[in-house]
Image (cartoon, rainbow, N blue to C red):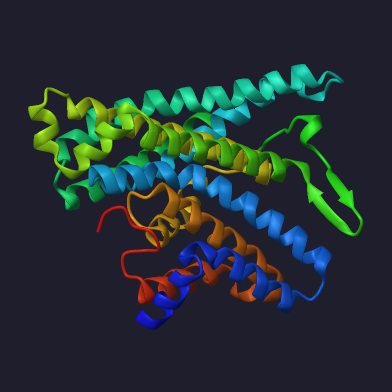
Amino acid sequence: MDKLSETLGRYGGVNLLPLALAAIAFVLIGAPSSWVTLTVAGLSMGMMVFLMASGLSLVFGLMDVLNFGHSAFVSFGAFIAASILAALGGWLGGDSVWLASAALGLALLGALAFGLAAGLFFETVIIRPVYRDHLRQILITMGALIVSEEIILAVWGGTPLIVPRPTFLEGAWIIGDVSIEIYRVFAFGLGLAAFVGLMVLLNRTRVGLLIRAGVENREMVEALGFKINRLFIGVFMLGSALAALGGAMWAGYVTVITPALGGEMMIVVFIVVIIGGLGSIEGTLLGAIIVGLTANYIGYLAPKLALASNMILMMAILMWRPSGLRPAVK
């Protein structure tokens, strides 16, 4: 394993894994048009999972909080966005791109606003009393996830909810034999914008510097007069808002959602965070892209192994690098 790590490091390190995965899949699939379609689908899926997982990685790695209720924000983001889109159905179905864009923007903003408010409530009421107690964190956040699913059942019912899309995001671009779904390109672009924004925030701003300094030496930052608790509340709210945004985008991707959405996505989100490494935004992006590509390639080549592919991937990577691909903390 050490020799493999050293060889990879000479040529770009673990960042080359998605390229290696795509190259192997190209040989196995054999049809370039199918390979391009699957690759675009895998990248867009990876970006949506990145939106959901990036907040958990920050909270998990920087605040040392095991939040198993994180996927509740994904569920609520999906249902709130779907409800806003349904209420503005007249705007979506019309000829005006501006009205359809406004409806989509309001749906995403609604999910973000809910994530911010719910994150503040969740951190203040549920997480704060159990800081530094992992067992109680697991129990109380799992309980919060179950309660949130029951609230969704009570408000929206148990019937699967159909999510309308703006007309300008329907359909696909046909380039030769290749079909590229427009919504997937939009999801990829939004995820990439979120990644750039997070990198700028953490590496180019004073707030990001204080957050990273607080993780390294909390007492020193507090001795300098900064309120580290306020910074961590902000991190938690940001992570919750990103999860809700990811849920809203995923709802538009699958077009049918149920109250079990959060529980279903929780496993994938945790796999991405563990593969990528705790507290690392770059690692989370890398893990999300690898998971997205693997799910699409295996789903095409060996459908019966599709459900197990992510678990096998996680086990293989942890046997190679126990702390994940690019951990910020160990």
Q: Residue at x 31, y 42 (%)?
A: 59
Q: Is any atom of residue 90 visible in this view?
A: no
Q: Residue at horizontal 40%, vertical 75%?
A: 5
Residue occupying image coordinates x 26% and y 39%: 212
Q: Quadrant of residue 203?
A: top left
Query: Percent from the top left, x then y, of residue 120?
Result: 31, 26
Residue 304 against residue 136 in the figure, above or below: below
Assign the N terminus to one quadrant of the image.
Answer: bottom left
Left/right of residue 127 with respect to residue 52 in the rendered view: left
Q: As drawn, which residue projects farthest toward the right?
A: 176
Q: State the image coordinates of residue 84 (x, y, percent, origin top left).
A: 62, 23
Q: Is residue 329 above or below residue 325?
A: above
Does residue 49 show up?
yes
Q: Nearer the viewer, residue 11 or 225?
A: 11
Depicted 168 relative to depicted 258: above or below: above
Q: Nearer the viewer, residue 160 or 52?
A: 52
User: Quadrant where the C terminus lies?
Assistant: bottom left
The percent coordinates of residue 265 (x first, y second) are 49, 51
At horizontal 84% and vertical 20% (from top left) the residue drawn is 94
* Quarter of the figure with residue 9: bottom left
Position in image of residue 65 (x %, y %):
25, 45
